[in-house]
Amino acid sequence: MKYDTSKIKVIKSPDNIIDLIKEIEECPSLFLVGKSIFCLRAFIDGWHFRNTDIDVKMDVLVKFNIWLQERNKLPKDFPWEKIILLYSQNEYEALKNFFSLFNKFISET
């Protein structure tokens, strides 16, 4: 069996968290084992900790977390994935809501 290799897209490893999230949003099943905001969190953490010597702008997620906390008037110890899940029907909807909220955050900052 021959495969048509002309349609294969080679994905370069993103240099920063914003580019990574854009790649995941485009095709979540390529990166995540499940359609869950917790799978997203686990993937992002693993991606970041693969090499902590590289500045991948993880501070963006810290600022995103603060933005969500302030927007929803929640305590500072609430992580972004739990905040989004709190206002979603389930983990899959929370995953979709994450991308929407993250894009809004990026456009506002």
Image (tube, rainbow, N blue to C red):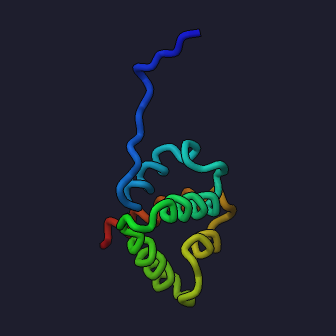
Q: Residue at x 48, y 50 (%)?
A: 24
x and y percent of residue 91 in the render? 67, 61
Give the percent coordinates (x, y) of residue 77: 58, 87
Foreground pick, 76 / 43: 43
With respect to residue 43, does 70 lie above or below?
below
Q: Residue furthest top?
A: 1
The residue located at (52%, 88%) in the rendering is 73
Residue lying at the far right of the rendered structure: 90
Say which quarter of the image contains residue 106.
bottom left
Q: Answer with left or right where residue 35 lies relative to residue 62.
A: right
In-front residue for pair 86/60: 60
Residue 34 in picture, x, y percent from top left:
66, 50
Q: How many marks?
A: 0
> On screen, 98 above or below 75?
above
Occupied quadrant, residue 40: bottom right
Q: Residue at x 43, y 23 (%)?
A: 7
- Identify the residue shown where x is 41% and y is 48%: 13
Left or right of residue 38, residue 59 in this image:
left
- The relative height of residue 79 versus residue 10 in the rendered view (above or below) is below
Q: For this view, does 8 lie left or right of residue 97?
A: left
Query: Which part of the image, by quadrant, shows the N terminus?
Result: top right
